[in-house]
Image (cartoon, rainbow, N blue to C red):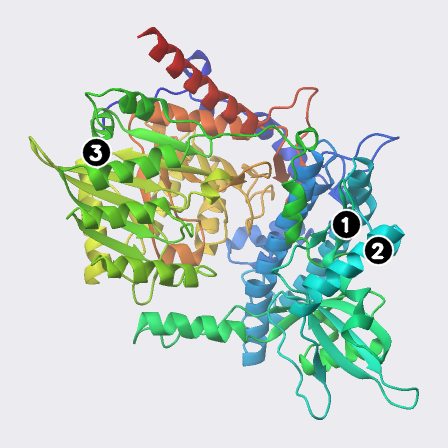
């Protein structure tokens, strides 16, 4: 491949990976630190920042350091002491998200948004991880994890830590964020704090527009216990008809199709919908005594068997959706002052143990707080970000004599979202292909996409224009199954060939191929990305994409799409690294090659940027490389089972985590390779499921300008002082020290994109 994007120049013409970074130079001190992050204090009257305080992070065992001297000689890197617990590592990430909500240097409404993100994250964790452990325990499985822990131990500790984070979230809201909102004119008040006029308006609103939507379901000998849907907010009510009768239990579902934040007076005073319902129960239960109430919420298991998928994948997916709806309850969240009678009824009827019952103050459900975070208050929000056009693609769009295909054929294009607009790059690429008379065929692999997807609309347009269109839609994309089923129906209605997935594997690769009739033959134009073809998430997820006319990459995608539709797994790829065919072995070879160079005295270097680093076999390879002297930086957003900084094992490994305005989602692998340097980007995390049970793709980046841009991205992330945390060897994290003007990678990337767009506009104006 020739040419490519113009990158940010590297100082003195040297790759940043040839120099020590701030994190690298302080690595040993960080790794050997025995102080827990939670020991930090706020200071005297200073604003709380996540640089100075992480609330309640639990202490972790330091047995790995003690075990090194005893176990190093036998070379047994499978010893559980060298691996962190998966669930605890994921929950450590959620604590970093909570720290963003607590950070007073963040705009207030951004802090509210992080509360909502934390709830969504923990809900998914409970549904998937807690649900999966609960399912294993019920089946009698007691297989130990790589960290040597039983299923019951993992479940107990995960529930305990998840509960602690939820309690910290509730304190963050009640003690920090709610008062700050009120101080800025956004007052979320209790119902009994309303003025008489507002209370009268609230009662009228309840009677006219809320009461008709409510359905109380009673539990007594004549009525079975009501079904309680997943993550629905409910009110339990105990009533009594006269003083001699016992109490009756009823459940009221708080409607999700009504505004959660109800306002009855001009300004920004809000009452939560559940408070309005609770305070007007006499209208719902006339002529009875309201004995007691309790707000509660249940979470159901999302882990269901896929054993029957091989027969009919659409029917199997629909069956999974039905069974997930009725999955067993794995968590009950309930108000702390709930009467024992209500707790007992719920725990008994939902088959819950004490450890699955979380007593929590506050709203219980923060996802709806995105409504508050979206209020039109620029003074409380961060500066808006508008993704920018990619300069080279935008220049081609303004040139009547050139097409987007001319631009890609001239030089490969590296996209960096959300700094580069997804809609003005990837969507435009597919839209132009759908209308180009010379395009013969379009193929795409869809894992997740928006409900109003421009990508899907382009594929439909292409089919209507007589082009051959083939689409791989992964029906097993968890929590997106229903959306994908609906898209399959629309695509097939236009005569598009749709593959639903591959038996035994989940298709996670993100790729599209355009086949074009050109003067010198058939041209193959490829897009390979790290993120989904989803225009909404592309506004907040950091991802990379490569647009290329490289024939070898195009031929590899032809083979890959033939596998999707023909079910014949091709094992001979020219350029791509494909799982489960050879990706694991190729990654292992890259790591081992660096280790060999280090043993030979060369300057060896690896950088791995992934969302999760969990695969024990690749972790062992990294340990061996570190023992050989390879300098290794792992940028891991979430789960990381690797222990850095263990004497004699991982002394040269530093684990970083970036948590900030945008969700880090790209995957990058860098190896110095004796000065030749290798760069790969793609869809695969370093997890066993991604390497062995999913179809994933990594693509090598060959063009020097694109490599320079990747180098600048990695250099900036490793220098970040605003969003970066560093892991200790016990699995806890500490924020990096920040100067007076801390380096903020996300801000730097936004500034670069704005600068490039400005230069483009200036050049256009001059021409």
Which residue is found at the position 39% from the left and 20% from the top?
7
Q: Which mark is residue 264?
A: 1
Q: CA distance from mark 1 to mark 2?
A: 8 Å
Where residue 476 appears, x then y in whole percent?
Answer: 39, 63
Q: Report crowding for label 2: few under 14, some 14 to 19, many 20 or more residues within 10 A (C-alpha).
A: some
Check disc 1 and report its element: helix, strand or loop: loop
Q: Report crowding for label 3: few under 14, some 14 to 19, many 20 or more residues within 10 A (C-alpha).
A: many
- Furthest-bottom residue in this view: 221
Q: CA distance from mark 1 to mark 3?
A: 59 Å
Which mark is nearer the camera, 1 or 3? 1
Closer to us: 306 or 426:
426
Check disc 3 and report its element: helix, strand or loop: loop
Vertically, is 49 above or below 480?
A: above
Vertically, is 543 above or below 612?
A: above
Vertically, is 303 above or below 649?
A: below
Q: Which mark is residue 549?
A: 3
Earlier along the polypeptide chain: callout 1 or callout 2? 2
Do labels 1 and 2 touch, CB within 8 Å? yes
Q: Which residue is mark 2?
A: 199
Q: Report crowding for label 1: few under 14, some 14 to 19, many 20 or more residues within 10 A (C-alpha).
A: some
Closer to us: 355 or 22:
355
Q: CA distance from mark 2 to mark 3?
A: 66 Å
Where residue 283 appears, x then y in whole percent?
Answer: 79, 71
- Furthest-left residue in this view: 520
Earlier along the polypeptide chain: callout 2 or callout 3? 2
In screen coordinates, is 6 left or right of 115? left
Where residue 429 appears, x then y in whole percent?
Answer: 28, 36
Residue 384 can be seen, yes or no: yes
Where residue 744 appears, x then y in whole percent?
Answer: 59, 27
Which residue is found at the position 57% from the left and 59% from the top?
124
Closer to us: 604 or 501:
501
In screen coordinates, is 657 left or right of 409? right
């Amino acid at each position: 491949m020739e040419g490519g994007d113009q990158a940010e120049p590297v100082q003195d013409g040297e790759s940043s990976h040839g120099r020590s970074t701030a994190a690298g130079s302080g690595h040993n001190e960080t790794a050997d630190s025995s102080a827990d992050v939670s020991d930090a204090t706020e200071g005297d009257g200073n604003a709380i920042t996540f640089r100075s305080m992480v609330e309640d992070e639990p202490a972790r065992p330091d047995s790995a350091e003690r075990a090194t001297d005893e176990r190093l000689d036998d070379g047994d890197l499978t010893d559980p002491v060298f691996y962190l617990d998966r669930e605890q590592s994921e929950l450590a990430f959620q604590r970093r998200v909570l720290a963003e909500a607590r950070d007073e240097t963040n705009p207030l409404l951004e802090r509210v948004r992080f509360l909502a993100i934390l709830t969504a994250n923990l809900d998914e964790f409970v549904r998937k991880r807690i649900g999966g452990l609960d399912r294993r325990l019920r089946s009698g499985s007691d297989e130990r994890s790589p960290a040597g822990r039983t299923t019951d131990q993992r479940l107990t500790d995960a529930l305990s830590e998840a509960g602690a984070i939820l309690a910290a979230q509730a304190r963050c809201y009640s003690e920090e964020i709610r008062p700050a909102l009120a101080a800025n004119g956004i007052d979320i008040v209790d119902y009994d704090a309303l003025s008489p006029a507002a209370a009268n308006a609230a009662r009228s609103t309840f009677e006219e527009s809320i009461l008709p939507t409510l359905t109380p379901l009673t539990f007594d000998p004549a009525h079975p216990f009501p079904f309680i849907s997943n993550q629905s907010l409910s009110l339990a009510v105990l009533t009594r008809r006269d003083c001699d009768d016992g109490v009756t239990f009823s459940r009221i579902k708080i409607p999700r199709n009504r505004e959660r934040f109800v306002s009855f007076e001009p300004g920004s005073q809000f009452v939560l919908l559940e408070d309005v319902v609770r305070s007007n129960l006499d209208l719902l239960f006339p002529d009875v005594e309201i004995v007691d109430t309790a707000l509660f919420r249940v979470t159901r298991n999302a882990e269901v068997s896929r054993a029957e998928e091989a027969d009919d994948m659409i029917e199997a997916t629909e069956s999974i959706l039905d069974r997930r709806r009725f999955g067993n309850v794995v968590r009950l969240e309930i108000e702390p002052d709930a009467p024992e009678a209500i707790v007992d009824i719920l725990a008994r009827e939902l088959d819950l143990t004490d450890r699955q019952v979380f007593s929590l103050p506050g709203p219980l459900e923060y996802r709806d707080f995105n409504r508050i975070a979206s209020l039109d208050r620029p003074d409380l929000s961060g500066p808006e970000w508008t993704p920018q056009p990619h300069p080279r693609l935008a220049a081609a769009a303004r040139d009547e004599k050139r097409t987007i295909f001319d631009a890609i054929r001239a030089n490969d294009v590296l996209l960096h979202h959300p700094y580069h607009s997804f809609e003005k790059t990837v969507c435009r690429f597919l839209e132009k292909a759908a209308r180009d008379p010379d395009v013969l065929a379009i193929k795409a692999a869809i894992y997740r996409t928006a409900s109003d997807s421009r990508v899907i609309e382009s594929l439909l347009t292409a089919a209507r224009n007589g082009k051959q269109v083939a689409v791989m839609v992964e029906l097993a994309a968890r929590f997106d199954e229903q959306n994908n089923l609906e898209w399959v129906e629309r695509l097939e209605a236009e005569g598009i060939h749709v593959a639903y997935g591959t038996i035994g594997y989940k298709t996670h690769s993100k790729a599209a191929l355009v086949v074009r009739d050109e003067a010198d033959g058939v041209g193959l134009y490829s897009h390979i990305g790290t993120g989904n073809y989803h225009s909404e998430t592309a506004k907040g997820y950091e991802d990379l994409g490569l647009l290329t006319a490289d024939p070898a990459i195009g031929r590899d995608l032809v083979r890959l799409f033939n596998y999707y539709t023909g079910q014949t797994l091709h094992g001979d790829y020219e350029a791509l690294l494909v799982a489960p065919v050879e990706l694991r072995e190729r990654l292992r070879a890259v790591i081992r090659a660096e280790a060999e160079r280090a043993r030979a005295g060369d300057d060896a270097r690896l950088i791995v940027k992934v969302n999760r680093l969990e695969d024990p076999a690749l972790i062992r390879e990294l340990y061996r490389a570190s023992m050989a002297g390879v300098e290794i930086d792992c940028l891991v957003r979430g789960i990381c089972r690797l222990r850095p900084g263990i004497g004699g094992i991982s002394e040269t490994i530093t684990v970083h985590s970036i948590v900030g305005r945008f969700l880090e989602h790209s995957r990058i692998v860098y190896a110095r390779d004796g000065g030749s340097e290798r760069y790969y980007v793609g869809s695969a995390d370093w997890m066993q499921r991604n390497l062995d049970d999913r179809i994933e793709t990594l693509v090598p980046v060959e063009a020097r300008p694109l490599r320079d841009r990747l180098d600048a991205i990695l250099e900036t992330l490793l220098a970040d002082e605003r969003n970066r945390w560093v892991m200790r060897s016990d699995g806890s994290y500490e924020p990096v020290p920040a100067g007076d003007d801390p380096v903020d990678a996300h801000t730097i990337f936004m500034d670069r994109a704005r600068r490039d767009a400005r230069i483009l506009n200036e050049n256009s104006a001059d021409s």
